[in-house]
Image (cartoon, rainbow, N blue to C red):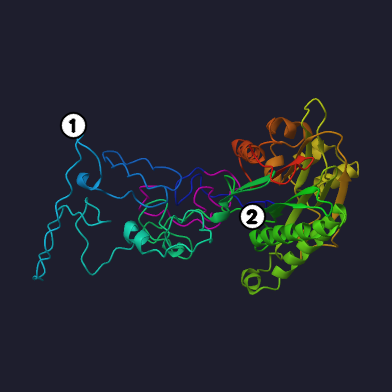
Amino acid sequence: MSQMPQQAAVPKCPSCEEPLESGDRFCGACGYDLSVVPARPEDSPTLAVNGAVPAPDGVDWPVARDSDGHGHPAPVHAAAEVPGTDSGGSPLPPPPPAPPAAPPAAPAAAPAAGAESSAPGVRLDRPAEPDEYPLQAPDPRLTAEAAPAPVPGQSRPAGTAGTAVAEKVCVACRAGRVDDDGYCENCGHAQPRERDHMEQESGPVAAVSDRGLRHHRNEDAFSVGCTALPDGAPASVAIVCDGVSSATRPDDASLAASRAAGESLLGALPRGTHPQQAMHDAILAAAQAVNALADEPATAREQAPHQNAPACTLVGAVVTAGLLVVGWVGDSRVYWVPADRSAPPARLTEDDSWAAQMVAAGLMNEAEAYADERAHAITGWLGADAYELEPHTASFKPDRAGVVVVCTDGLWNYAESAQEMAEAVPLDAASRPLHSARVLVGHALDGGGHDNVTVALLPFPAPPQGAGSA
């Protein structure tokens, strides 16, 4: 959920000069806090995280070398170090042997300004640094060699490429070490966080979540999985949660809720619990997980008089061979899109929001209600300060094949009606759910990406175990 943002005081971000829109609280490029805008820094970065900054007039900046694909600068090789053949097809001669080690000598005089040096990580457009000032970033090649060997059978975190997690290299300058707070010690750039963009595929189910273009972090989370009912019939599960931005730790709330609900469903269905009852119990388990965050010290440290306890919304779906069950609290939605697009699509959930209440009371039509600035004020959520929890569940038995779309308002804001959502869903979504989820996230980003975007796709009926994207 998005909180009503404060007015941005400047047209461009004081840190990276990315253009801002009215109402932005944080820069969408670097996460700069716009609530208190300090004086513009005297120096500007020569390389931005999201692209090159135009060079000042009269300065011809050199082009940065490509990396090796893992965030490290490309290693430098002499020609003789690379195996190959000459123009006549004969092997290249081996490199000359290294000269014998020379005896220790008196320290040499410091090189003159502008003298070239071949030491790794030393810039050639300024004088060499004194010996008493060590480089902030180690040679990435040496770091890779010193990294411990992977343990057989143990997965390696994405992007580590053999290096220790503590030795991550800045994605902007490609030389500085990243500190524990996620900033480069060399150039100061904030590093992309793991949750900025997430993708997962579990059998025939897939989900994608993205930070969007205007938020400084991703406060959405999801959980997807497959299991089997006691009779061996397949069942697919998807949970999508949206953190309430005006609450404390909304990102932690959505993550805790999605994990608790997903684990509850995947544990209850194989035991024979009816899918609709299992969904109801999963929402209660998610609520307990979010409530527990309010008692943690991290919440107490961040708590302020104008803030609420950690909170999020939740929406989920369970698909079996002949039954579709949905459950929700909040304003995230589930859509039904039949494979035969001549049949009408449908929205299967009703928002817990101000706009939905106005429509239900007959005070406004749907177009008027959702055009109001209060439309997205939610009336139901998971959290310790929530009103009486009322999990909503519903069961459906579609008479044809199709795909189930489970999403946050970061997507449906750009495809609100069931027909608009059906038009945005690719025709092959049932056979390529991960690709189609990426397409839907791209649809929201192309529309403006003003909120975090998360979508999960489940084919109906649930295909046999082992089926996945083509």
- Using the numbered discs, state the Cα–Cα distance from disc 1 to disc 2 in whole angstroms: 61 Å
Q: From this viewpoint, is residue 375 visible?
A: no
Q: Residue at x 33, y 48 (%)?
A: 74
Compared across the picture, whether 10 is left or right of 2 comes to left
Q: Main secondary structure of the magenta part?
A: loop
Camera-side residue: 157 or 187? Answer: 157
Which residue has dot 2 on it?
219
Camera-side residue: 339 or 246? Answer: 339
* Percent coordinates x, y for residue 141 in the rendering: 33, 57
Q: Is residue 390 above or below residue 336?
A: below
**The disc labelled 1 sits on which kind of residue?**
Gly
Question: Is residue 40 found inside the magenta-colored segment of the image?
Answer: yes
Q: Nearer the viewer, mark 1 or mark 2?
A: 1
Q: Mark 1, residues whose alpha carbon is within 10 Å: few (<14), some, or many (≥20)?
A: few
Determine which of the numbered discs, if any, sits on residue 88 in the image. 1
Q: Which residues are magenta?
A: 20-47
Quarter of the rendering containing residue 271 = bottom right
